[in-house]
């Protein structure tokens, strides 16, 4: 079983004490997000866990406390999102310099194959036009050269709650269909070229519009072939039926809860 901690909230930044406590207990309970009356027990015993996948925007504390995870014998994979958007879009993210230095420290501890950089989601707006993304991606990719082997990108999904949240921001203008923007192809080609020049494989996450024409292959965030190649762990390649149809990830068990992340990113799908 693969443990996902978590697509729904930032466990390494906000709930690491809880996670360590549950590891010590050997299990945790998870509420079904579609049925709050349904609660299941998930084993965290090392013999039952093939891999732990962390998702975070600030894994600095995780880096400092890796010893507490020694029972998993380095069977860890970390997705670390760094975008560096303006504070109006990401009001509670760590300072960009701190995030980059933390990412590098974790990469040195685990190895560059175990820490994946997410430039995700790509949000095209008057605060973050295509020119912003090209320059920002180049800046970040250059800083992370040698510290990661893979970069994951995707576009914002405009769920109704996201749209309502964005409309409350005075003066904010955004493109709900950035793939139709004339500057979009050049932006994505520049991002793909930059990633490869910095030694990173770049893949797209659950995109309905193929990005292959820009040099970005469709990818899986929890990818059986990548996990086998970089971590030496063999897991089932069966697609996770709990994820949306366009998602290519293999099966995992998410132990987080929606509406608990403290980041307040305007484009987030996981918070009300």
Image: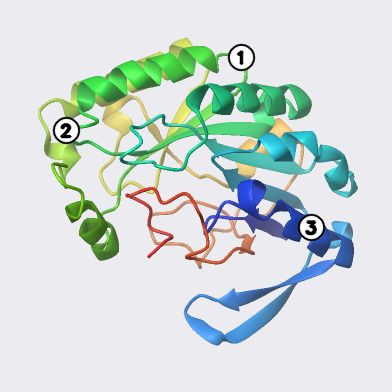
Image coordinates for residue 136, horizontal then vertical, percent: 36, 20
Residue visible at 50% across and 45% down?
A: 220
15 or 91, nearer to the observer: 91
Q: Which mark is residue 126?
A: 2
Q: Are marks 1 and 3 in contact (CB under 8 Å)?
A: no
In three-dimensional space, the C-alpha distance between marks 1 and 3, rounded to whole angstroms, equals 29 Å
The quadrant where residue 74 appears: top right
Q: Residue furthest bottom?
A: 37
Label 3 vs label 2, nearer the camera: 2
Q: From what the image shows, is residue 140 above or below residue 167?
A: above
Residue picked out by circle 3 = 49
Work out whether residue 215 or residue 30 is closer to the camera in this orientation and state it. Answer: 30
Q: Which residue is mark 1?
A: 146
Residue 228 visible in image: no
Furthest-left residue in view? Answer: 182
**Residue 231 % position (x, y):** 74, 35
Quarter holding the N terminus?
bottom right
């Amino acid at each position: 079983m693969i443990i996902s901690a978590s697509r729904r909230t930032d466990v390494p930044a906000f709930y690491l004490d809880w996670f360590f406590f549950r590891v010590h207990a050997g299990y945790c309970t998870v509420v079904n997000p579609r049925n709050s009356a349904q609660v299941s027990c998930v084993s965290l015993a090392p013999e039952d866990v093939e891999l732990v996948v962390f998702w975070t925007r600030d894994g600095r504390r995780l880096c400092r406390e890796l010893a507490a995870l020694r029972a998993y014998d380095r069977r860890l994979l970390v997705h670390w999102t760094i975008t560096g958007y303006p504070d109006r879009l990401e009001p509670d993210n760590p300072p960009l310099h701190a995030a980059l230095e933390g990412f590098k420290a974790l990469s040195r501890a685990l190895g560059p194959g175990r820490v994946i950089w997410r430039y995700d989601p790509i949000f095209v707006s008057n605060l973050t036009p295509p020119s912003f993304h090209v320059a920002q991606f180049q800046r970040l990719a250059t800083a992370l050269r040698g510290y990661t082997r893979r970069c994951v990108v995707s576009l914002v999904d405009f769920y109704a709650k996201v749209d309502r949240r964005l409309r409350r921001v005075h003066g904010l203008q955004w493109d709900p269909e950035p793939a139709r923007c004339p500057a979009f192809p050049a932006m994505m080609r520049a991002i793909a070229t930059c990633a490869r020049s910095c030694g990173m494989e770049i893949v797209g996450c659950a995109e309905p519009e193929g990005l292959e024409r820009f040099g970005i292959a469709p990818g899986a965030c929890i990818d059986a072939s990548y996990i086998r190649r970089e971590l030496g762990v063999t897991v089932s390649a069966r697609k996770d039926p709990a994820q949306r149809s366009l998602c290519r990830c293999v099966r995992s068990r998410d132990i987080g809860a929606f509406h608990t992340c403290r980041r307040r990113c305007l484009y987030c799908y996981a918070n009300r």
